[in-house]
């Protein structure tokens, strides 16, 4: 009798009930709990987005499930389909499961806009869930821009001492926890029985790290004094170590730093868009542009110019006149500057000239032409313009006669 009562009591606990709701961008779904006091029946609600077709216009688009609930008393499960969400849910509810990696409770869930994504929520409280769309996610654009800049300036940064010190301080601040774990592991006896405790300790450590990341904003706000002194002390120690070791001088070490930066830049570019084909294409174009041999590019350019030489553009009469005036004025100014310098040996030059007084006037800023020469030049220019205009009129008359 007692056994039957236990089975009857256990059936509602092991029972599973779930509903699947498909949402479109901009939709809002409200859940109203119908649970009564003392009821232990689990209630799982699954919300899915079917995904949309890929396009270049949606390369920086992102979708987000937003859960609006007044407390944190809910459990969340992710998956690509409702069956996968139910599988995760059933595995979590088994007696022998202890999934440390599913303790996170996110009220804002970013999803892939091009693939089907489902989110399961189990709670006894009322809530609303929204599927919001961001047409242009500026965070993705910034991530792409930083990745491209980091890739093309990786060589410069790898040879900059300031970047070396800043990177060392940054890694020292965030990696000091690993140093504490390393020295703590030295205190553990090297016995087979201790390895199980070590694995369990790492599991608990991962749990606490996840909790710290999720509550980072609260930690920085509540314990800002401790965080400030932690950053100051670890940053100073990191700077001392980096200063003692000094920046790398070996070219191979610099190459390794450059390749590491470029690898990190490629990761940024890859995750800058959920349109993986587009992000991978940007990566390939970036790598090809950076490592494409310039000598081969010059050969291809030279072959193209020889095969398809550019057609020279002839100057018009007005352009020719303007160019001649400009170049003549420039040449005369250069001649005046040379004649005024000691290098021209002016006394020897004066003995070779027919009209030294005219030359001296020219050097002092006078015109290089006299009145007769100016009159002859203007007359010649008028006659040349008349001949050009007459030829143009004859060509127009010839074209009109041929059209008739």
Image (cartoon, helix red, strand yellow):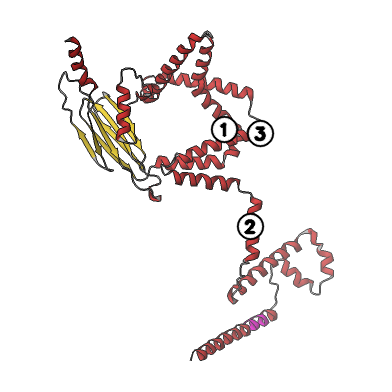
Q: Against 218, is 148 above or below? A: below
Task: Say the numbered circle drawn on residue 92.
Answer: none
Q: Nearer the viewer, residue 251 or 187?
A: 187
Between the residue at mark 2 and the residue at mark 3, the CA separation in whole angstroms equals 31 Å
Residue 179 falls left or right of residue 126: right
Tell me if mark 3 has few (under 14), some (14-19) or many (20+) residues whose alpha carbon lies within 10 angstroms of its own. Answer: few
Between the residue at mark 1 and the residue at mark 3, the CA separation in whole angstroms equals 17 Å
Mark closer to the observer (2, 3): 2
Residue sitting at x 68%, y 72%? 367
**Is residue 272 located in the magenta-colored stretch of the structure?**
no
| Badge 3 element | helix
Mark 2 and 1 residues: CB-CB less than 8 Å, in contact? no
Mark closer to the observer (1, 3): 3
Identify residue for label 1.
163
Between the residue at mark 2 and the residue at mark 1, the CA separation in whole angstroms equals 37 Å
Tell me if mark 2 has few (under 14), some (14-19) or many (20+) residues whose alpha carbon lies within 10 angstroms of its own. Answer: few
Q: Is tag 1's residue or tag 3's residue first in the polypeptide sequence?
A: 1
The quadrant of the picture occupied by the N terminus is top left
For residue 226, which quarter of the picture? top left
Task: Say the numbered circle drawn on residue 300.
Answer: 2
Task: Provide residue 131's location: percent of width, then percent of height.
Answer: 28, 39
Magenta residues span 375-381
| Badge 2 element | helix
Q: Against 394, is 274 above or below? A: above
Q: Against 278, is 342 above or below? A: below
Residue sitting at x 41%, y 19%? 225
């Amino acid at each position: 009798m007692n056994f039957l009562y236990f089975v009857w009591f256990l059936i509602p606990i092991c029972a599973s009930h779930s509903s699947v709701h498909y949402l479109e961008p901009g939709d809002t779904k409200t859940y109203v709990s119908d649970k009564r006091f003392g009821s232990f029946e689990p209630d799982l609600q699954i919300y899915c987005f079917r995904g949309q077709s890929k396009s270049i216009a949606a390369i920086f688009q992102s979708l987000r499930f937003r859960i609006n609930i007044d407390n944190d008393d809910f459990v969340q499960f992710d998956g690509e389909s409702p069956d996968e969400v139910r599988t995760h849910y059933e595995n979590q509810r088994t007696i022998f499961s202890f999934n440390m990696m599913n303790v996170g409770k996110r009220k804002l869930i970013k999803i892939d806009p091009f693939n089907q994504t489902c989110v399961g929520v189990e709670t006894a409280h009322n809530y609303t869930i929204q599927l919001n769309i961001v047409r242009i996610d500026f965070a993705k654009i910034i991530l792409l821009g930083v990745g491209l800049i980091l890739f093309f300036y990786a060589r410069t940064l790898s040879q900059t001492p300031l970047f070396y010190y800043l990177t060392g301080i940054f890694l020292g601040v965030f990696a000091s926890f690993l140093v504490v774990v390393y020295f703590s592991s030295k205190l553990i006896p090297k016995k087979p029985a201790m390895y199980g405790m070590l694995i369990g300790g790492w599991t608990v450590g991962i749990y606490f790290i996840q909790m710290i990341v999720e509550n980072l904003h609260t930690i920085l706000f509540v314990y800002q004094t401790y965080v400030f002194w932690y950053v100051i002390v670890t940053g100073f120690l990191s700077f001392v170590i980096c200063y003692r070791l000094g920046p790398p001088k070996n070219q191979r070490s610099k190459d390794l730093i450059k390749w590491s930066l470029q690898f990190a830049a490629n990761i940024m570019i890859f995750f800058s868009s959920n349109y993986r084909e587009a992000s991978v294409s940007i990566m390939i174009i970036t790598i090809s542009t950076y490592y494409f041999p310039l000598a081969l590019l010059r050969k291809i350019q030279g072959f193209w110019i020889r095969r398809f030489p550019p057609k020279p553009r002839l100057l018009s009469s007005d352009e020719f006149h303007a160019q001649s005036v400009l170049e003549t004025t420039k040449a005369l100014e250069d001649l005046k500057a040379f004649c005024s310098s000691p290098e021209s040996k002016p006394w020897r030059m004066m003995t070779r000239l027919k009209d030294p007084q005219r030359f001296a006037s020219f050097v002092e800023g006078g015109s290089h032409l006299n009145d007769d020469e100016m009159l002859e030049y203007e007359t010649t220019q008028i006659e040349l313009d008349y001949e050009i205009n007459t030829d143009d009129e004859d060509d127009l008359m010839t074209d009109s006669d041929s059209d008739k």
